[in-house]
Image: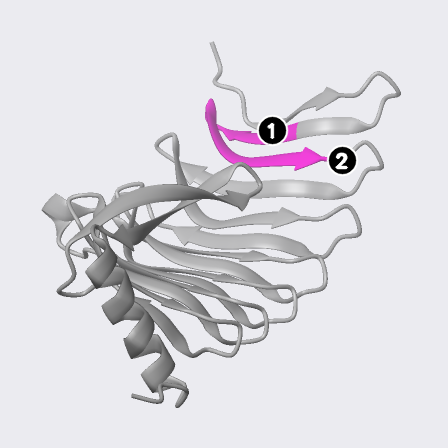
Amino acid sequence: GKVYTGWVDEKYKDGNILKEFFVDDGTVIYIATYYENGQLKDEQYRRNKNINGPALGYYKDGSLRYAGYELDGEDWLPYVYYHENGQIKSETLYWQGKEAGFFNEFFESGKISKQYKFAKSPDRGGELLSMVLCRESGFKFTEAEVENGEIVDQLMYDEKGVLELDSRGVEKKWFYIDAGLNSYLKVWRPVNEQDAIDNAKKTLAKKGLNKN
């Protein structure tokens, strides 16, 4: 029989459109989903069952929620997400579905919140190399180097951006602290008392408070 070309839709109970598809010769080439109020929620163009072209998402008020662009057969895929106020929420580059190169996250104010660096080589896609976490004031909170999924060295800063703890070259043990929102941050403590004393002296000296 004849292969179908045209629109197909699914609806909410009240009759408003939930999803709609455009089919070309039996193949879906466009998909859109809608909020119950009729506002467009997501839309994407497809080819060979894969996204091919822009992939866009919207908030209920119609403002942009995310924007990505994918080409069938291409491995490098950029995506940007937005806060409801229009500021960028996050931006990243994907390699075959895994973060590659970078991932940046921002506060609603537009200031940087997180910076993750990922390996870019195809065989190491998704491998985290380093990270920086910042306060909304703009000062760094912590930065760390990562190897094989584990933090190996870490710097931590106070609310004014002054270095407080430096794990480089210090024998240490790691533990986790509650960072809120069901997430945990890996930090460290010196293994022995002398290490703790030496670290305290370094911190005081950097603040100009060490009298010795």
Q: Position of residue 18 (x, y in %)?
A: 72, 27
SS under mark 2: loop
Q: Is residue 142 left or right of residue 3?
A: left
* Category of crowding for the residue at label 1, using alpha-carbon neighbours closer than 10 angstroms: few (below 14), some (14–19), many (at least 20): few
Checking the image for residue 6, the label placed there is: 1
Q: Which residues are magenta?
A: 20-34
Which residue is labeled 2 in the image?
A: 35
Residue 127, position as x, y percentages in the image: 21, 47
Amino acid type shown at disc 2 = Tyr
Q: Are marks 1 and 2 in contact (CB under 8 Å)?
A: no
Main SS, magenta region, reads strand
Residue at x-position 65% and y-position 56%: 64
Q: Is residue 168 magenta?
A: no
Total number of numbered labels? 2
Q: What is the three-letter code of the residue carrying label 1?
A: Gly
Residue at 81% x, 38% y is 38
For the point 21% across and 43% down, the residue is 149
Q: Classify residue 132 by image quadrant.
A: bottom left
Please identify the quarter of the rendering in which residue 16 is found: top right
Image quarter (top left, top right, bottom left or bottom right) of the C terminus = bottom left
